[in-house]
């Protein structure tokens, strides 16, 4: 006579349940009106927004992960990818939701913020469709252009070309379009190793916050804070120090982070000197901008792509994280190295604000040396790969 089988939970189930309850309790405490008022009165509004977005992401990511598994939205292993187990996508939807909920809960929208918010929503929608149905590159590009057009319609436009110049308005529109598309796709291309895109997003948003604080733009400081928190709340599930990620950002998340960072850069006034004001966001985003420029140039020079369509569709393991890994670094070491490089260049950006001309020149030379070191290392890795 067979014995009845006892149904037992895994030994880790109580720990997982306890962690989930702790996250929920943390979120509930943060949204209590007395807690909000007390933190606001203490002058820690920026930290509160980071904490709220962080808590929302901590709670939301497991929910989205479960839905992705249920719907079968998984990223399967492939030759150009670094993971070996099918992993849920749609993590970017949780990052976007945490950011959006924090902003809606704490802000009244300005016209420009509405433009970035609506454009980012379009970006996320296109990214989710791509995660679900593998949208062709040209249609993704069309969706990105539509999102940028919406943002520009709300006044999110660069003023790089002086108004006194002939044709300044259309030139600034073109530059704005190129800026948004470049930053959005640069972050998306770097979403190829656990923790990299979200880590770069958190670091860039942090330095935009500091730069906005330097230039007396508290509105932008508090707008960047939810992005810092949302990215940090995603990282525990994605960057697990040697263990495989339990969820990926997907195209929706990486492109959303890039688009929002591009919008922050356009909306801000980063210095009284126009040249310094232009360089500040470029240095904060130097790692993704350098990667997309360097990889794109190499692909064209070596004859691997011959048109914009080929460039959009081309995939290979030739980005900065692939090159560093091929030098013998582990994936965790590779990601940490790139994040430290991004932080170093971000520090250079915040030092520019009050620098004299000579100090600014030295800071730019230093940043150039850091990027030159990256180029040399990538050249060594490329030579070994032949």
Image (spheres, rainbow, N blue to C red):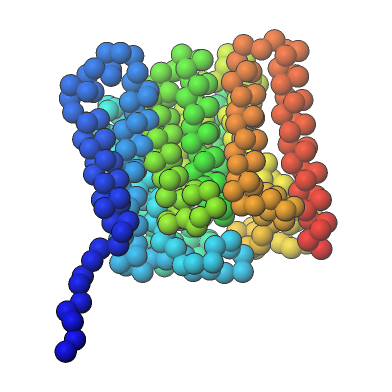
Up-down relation of residue 177 to residue 273 (above or below): below
* Foreground of the two, 130 or 91: 91
Q: From the image, which quarter does the C terminus lie in? A: bottom right
Q: Position of residue 275 (x, y in %)?
A: 65, 21
- Position of 54 compared to 352: left or right? left
Q: Which residue lies furthest to the front in this view?
A: 1
Could you say which quadrant of the image residue 337 lies in?
top right
* Foreground of the two, 27 or 202: 27
Q: Residue at x 72, y 47 (%)?
A: 294
Up-down relation of residue 374 to residue 385 (above or below): above
Q: Position of residue 121 (x, y in %)?
A: 36, 46
- Position of 333 compared to 132: left or right? right
* Foreground of the two, 174 or 151: 151
Could you say which quadrant of the image residue 231 lies in?
top left
Q: Position of residue 295 (x, y in %)?
A: 70, 51
- Position of 162 compared to 215: left or right? right
Up-down relation of residue 279 to residue 385 (above or below): above
Q: Where is residue 181 in the image (x, y as percent from the top left)?
A: 54, 46
Q: Residue at x 58, y 63 (%)?
A: 81
Do we see residue 292 in this rendering?
no
């Amino acid at each position: 006579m067979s014995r009845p089988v006892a149904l037992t939970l895994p030994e880790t189930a109580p720990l997982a349940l306890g962690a989930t309850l702790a996250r929920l309790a943390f979120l509930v405490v943060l949204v209590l009106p007395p807690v909000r008022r007390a933190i606001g009165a203490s002058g820690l509004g920026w930290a509160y927004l980071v904490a709220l977005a962080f808590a929302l992401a901590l709670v939301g990511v497991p929910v989205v992960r479960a839905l992705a598994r249920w719907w079968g939205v998984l990223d399967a292993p492939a030759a150009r990818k670094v993971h070996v187990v099918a992993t849920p996508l749609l993590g970017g939807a949780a990052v976007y939701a945490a950011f959006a909920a924090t902003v809606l809960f704490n802000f009244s929208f300005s016209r420009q913020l509405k433009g970035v918010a609506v454009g980012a929503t379009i970006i996320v929608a296109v990214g989710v469709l791509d995660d679900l149905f593998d949208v062709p590159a040209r249609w993704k590009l069309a969706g990105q252009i539509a999102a940028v057009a919406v943002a520009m319609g709300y006044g999110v436009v660069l003023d790089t070309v002086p108004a006194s110049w002939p044709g300044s308005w259309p030139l600034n529109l073109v530059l704005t379009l190129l800026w948004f598309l470049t930053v959005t796709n640069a972050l998306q291309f770097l979403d190829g190793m656990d923790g990299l895109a979200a880590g770069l997003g958190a670091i860039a948003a942090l330095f935009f916050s500091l730069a906005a604080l330097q230039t007396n733009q508290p509105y932008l400081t508090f707008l960047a804070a939810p992005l810092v928190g949302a990215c940090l709340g995603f990282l525990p599930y994605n960057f697990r120090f040697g263990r495989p990620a339990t969820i990926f950002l997907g195209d929706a998340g990486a492109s959303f982070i890039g688009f929002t960072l591009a919008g922050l850069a356009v909306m801000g006034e980063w210095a009284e000197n126009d040249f310094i004001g232009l360089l500040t966001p470029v240095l904060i985003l130097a790692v993704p901008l350098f990667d997309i420029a360097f990889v794109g140039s190499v692909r064209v020079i070596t004859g691997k792509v011959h048109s914009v369509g080929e460039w959009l569709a081309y995939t290979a393991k030739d980005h900065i994280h692939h090159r560093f890994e091929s030098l013998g670094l582990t994936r965790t070491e590779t990601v940490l190295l790139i994040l430290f490089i991004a932080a170093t260049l971000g520090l250079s950006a915040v030092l520019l604000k009050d620098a004299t001309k000579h100090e600014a020149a030295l800071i730019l030379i230093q940043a150039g040396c850091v990027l030159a070191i990256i180029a040399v290392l990538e050249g060594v890795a490329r030579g070994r790969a032949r």
